[in-house]
Amino acid sequence: MQTLSTLDPEFDRLFARVVNARREADSDVAGVVQDILRTVKTGGDDALVQYTQRYDGYSLIDDADWKITPERCAQAYEDLDGELRDALNLAATRIRAYHEAQLPENRDYTDDAGVRMGAIWRPVDAAGLYVPGGRAAYPSSLLMNAIPAKVAGVERIVVVTPTPKGNSNPLVLAAAHLAGVDEIWRVGGAQAVGALAYGSDRIKPVDVITGPGNAYVAEAKRQLFGVVGIDMVAGPSEILVVADGKNDPDWIAADLLSQAEHDPTSQSILITDDAGFAAQVEDSITLQLSLLDTGKTAKASWDQHGVIVVVNDIGAEAPALINQLAAEHLELAIDDPESMLPKVRHAGSVFLGRMTPEAVGDYVAGPNHVLPTGRRARFSSGLSVLDFMKRTSFIALDDGAFNAIGPAAATLAHAEGLPAHAKSVELRLK
């Protein structure tokens, strides 16, 4: 962990290193993934069988080995402890309500020239959702991916998930039942992403692929963008907490560790105007790490990538630092977070006030927790209903409208050296 101060003459250089540091996989991953995708494209099911045996120690032989049935998912839901089922239901209800409000409206209007135009929104035919099966087998992520697809109106929702040694997460299966998933295939890794994009003998291709995964999954999505749509190329998780000295240091320490426990490459950053408070947070992190079941992972993340930035004036200095970092998650644990919010131009999701920890957003708040990482919040947004929809525009002209705007189209076509374009218009002009 490193501590920086804006009073240090070297601060700009040191902070730039934090901003530009890459915590993602090295270039060797790209070559491995390229080979896997090529093999899946040509080898289909046979390739999936080989990769699944190699990486998951699981044999795909007949239908029962390949797929997890809706009946098994329904049983997993029924078998949940009542309190856990209620929590899952609450999460699904709130996620669904938030995303239903995102549904776009079609447009159909006629302008002053008499030209009718507009746009129609339609869902994609099929969506593929990647659900990790190892350290990151989270039912919350399945809900965050499947429910927006369902709300968008996608008719076929397909999950791929690795099942090491044949083991699956019952809570993930229960979430799949609750979200209305249509198919669950027991394949994972870059090979599963390839199967969703290209199709195989058993798995029909999809139009959009979303969902978190390891570096190989992320790279597979990146390489397949254009063959299919993707949500984003996601990197390691990150959290930026802006907190003054009025906070409980134990709370802020826990917030920072909530992302550190995801993966050793995750990053947690604290910006504060109180050096004494920063020291208290650091002490609390040390204590909490010793008590966490995920302490080994969280400690590796904090030791290697944790940062504390001490500023002189949190209101004046924090916004610029926030926008440079463009973090996935941003907590504003200060007296008046509303006054800082308009100054935040780049963040995946913002959590306002001392009583709004990022962890609530991961589960039950409603907005999507699939968010841009690695400073991609500068140009992209979190997962939404629109990731599962596309817009088709339409135009209709009668004689009057055509004669009003057609001559300008012909003029521009000639200027671009495209005489056939111009003639297509001129033949119709009166």
Image (cartoon, grey):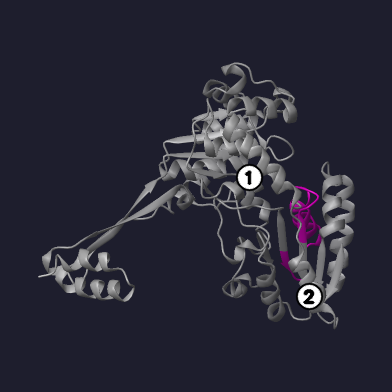
Q: Residue at x 85, y 57 (%)?
A: 304
Q: Residue at x 90, y 47 (%)?
A: 290
Q: How many marks?
A: 2
Residue 165 in the figure: left or right of residue 378: right
Q: Is residue 397 left or right of residue 286?
A: left
Q: Which residues are magenta?
A: 241-268
In the image, is residue 237 part of the stretch drawn in magenta? no
Which residue corresponds to mark 1?
220
Query: Mark 1 and 2 residues: CB-CB less than 8 Å, in contact?
Result: no
Q: Secondary structure at mark 2?
A: loop
Q: Residues within 10 Å of mark 2 (few under 14, many from 20)?
A: many
Query: The N terminus is located in which quarter?
Result: bottom right
Q: Residues within 10 Å of mark 1 (few under 14, many from 20)?
A: many
Instruction: Confirm whether residue 335 shows in the render.
Output: no
Task: Looking at the image, tell me whether mark 1 or mark 2 is earlier in sequence order.
Answer: 1
Q: Secondary structure at mark 1?
A: helix
Quadrant the C terminus occupies: bottom left
How far across and how far down the image is residue 319, in percent?
66, 75
**Residue 218's x, y, as percent?**
65, 47
Q: Amino acid at mark 1?
A: Ala
Whether residue 67 is visible:
yes
Front in this rendered view, residue 180 or 335? 180
The amino acid on which the numbered mark 2 sits, given as a three-letter code, is Asp
From the viewer's perspective, is 423 left or right of 386?
left
Residue at 61% across / 68% down in the picture? 346
Q: Which residue is mark 2?
A: 273
